[in-house]
Amino acid sequence: MESLTVTAEKIVFGGSCLARVNGKNVFIPYAIPGEKLEIEITKTFRDYDLAKIIKVIEPSPYRIMPFCPLYGKCGGCNMQHIQIDYQRELRKQMLKDCFEREGLKCPEIEIISGSDKNYRARLQLTDGGLNEKDSNTIVELENCPVATKAINDYLKKTPQALRPEGRVHFFGDQRIISSDDAENPSLIIANEEKADLWQQKRVGKSKKQPKNKVKQRFAGTSGVMKNNCTIRLKDKLIQFDVQGFFQSNMEVLEKTIDAITYNMGGEIVLDMYSGAGTFSVFLADIFKKTILVEHNRDALVHAEINMSGKPHETYGLSGAKWVQTNAPMILAKNGPFDAVVIDPPRSGMEKEVCDWLCKNKTGQIRSVSCDPSTHARDALKLVKSGYELTKLYLLDFYPQTAHIESLAYFEYTE
């Protein structure tokens, strides 16, 4: 196919740069805004094309040599060719674009960041290696420059053939206190045989029975689950399942917790989509009572352990179901929430949850998101209902990638 010469325009969500050829949008991976490029179209669609770089004719002053020999082959990082401070500015611009597309006026976006290398504590290996980009081919490796020292120590001393088969979760960080592996004290390798946590023996019982059929409190399980990991996060012990969801960047997570809890406090707080209760553990220090809602009951097993001794109630059901069946009872019993912390999945808040927040006008909402498009969509609904978007943070959990997480403050004053 004939090559074309274009100038890369803005970077778009996902990390490719936009260019235009005969009025048609062309998306170019590994480009940097402002560069003059020789490209070749690789795929053609009705509304846009995909292209690859043949030659960088006029490179950006921010273009650097990637530090990983597998860059471009491994399916992980896609921004290593960009100087780190400029990377963060580009991610900030992508976040801003998503909010402005919804017609929202953004406050100045602040960046919460940490180390740009050796930060990633969670990693999934397939047959001991990484998946090649857009392929099921396994890339062998002895070092991943964005993974933590604990993971790289394991990769260096463990030959590929001796690593676990299949797709396996690793969690490695110096904050781990639960490893019983003398050779790898800062590493937990998941046993990928699925265990039904709810069939294991429970310890302890809730003293109060709820007035409805949904259990408010989960008592936890015996402490012998194979994939438990306990870390010391700031001054707290947090337990979670290595196979389940947990953040990958502990340094940025600790800073995010500070930002979420800043200038908050009161009688009662709601932690919606609470997971294993990571935020709740810290909210319990500044609120008299914490309500946790999470549909994944396996995660709530760990949340109960993490919240032991702290006044709280846990609800193992979806947010949509909770606002319909439980919220009215809780509001009648405790009065309105002083604050809400909400951390939904990539799809964003359930419609019923967002509508409930819009209706109930909680004084403070701290909204965490792993998708800027759905975050902006939900933010627009809150702002239209009377909330003010007072702060917006880029949470730089994944340097060297185009992945964007964000934290927004919403305030309601009558």
Image (cartoon, grey):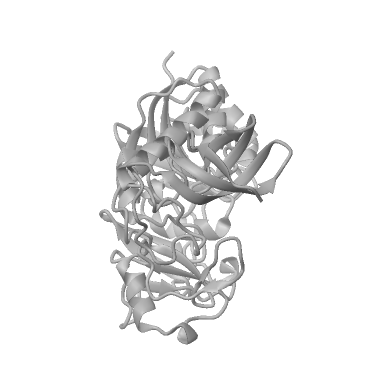
Residue drawn at the location 39% of the way across and 49% of the way down: 397
Q: Is residue 355 left or right of residue 275?
A: right
Give residue 353's position: percent from left, percent from top: 59, 34
Residue sticking out furthest to the left:
235
Residue 288 higher or lower than 137, as above or below: above
Residue drawn at the location 43% of the way across and 39% of the way down: 35
Quarter the C terminus occupies: top left
Question: Within the image, what quadrant is residue 69 found in?
Answer: bottom left
Residue drawn at the location 40% of the way across and 46% of the way down: 280
Would you say residue 175 is visible in this rendering?
A: yes
The foreground one among 176 and 208 is: 176
Give the total of numbered labels. 0
Residue sticking out furthest to the front:
2
Give residue 256's position: percent from left, percent from top: 34, 44
Residue 405 higher or lower than 140, as above or below: above
Would you say residue 288 is visible in this rendering?
A: no
Give residue 199's position: percent from left, percent from top: 60, 70
Give residue 270's position: percent from left, percent from top: 46, 38
The foreground one among 277 and 191 is: 191
Residue drawn at the location 46% of the way across and 34% of the way down: 95
Residue sticking out furthest to the right:
46
Question: Within the image, what quadrant is residue 77 found in?
Answer: bottom left
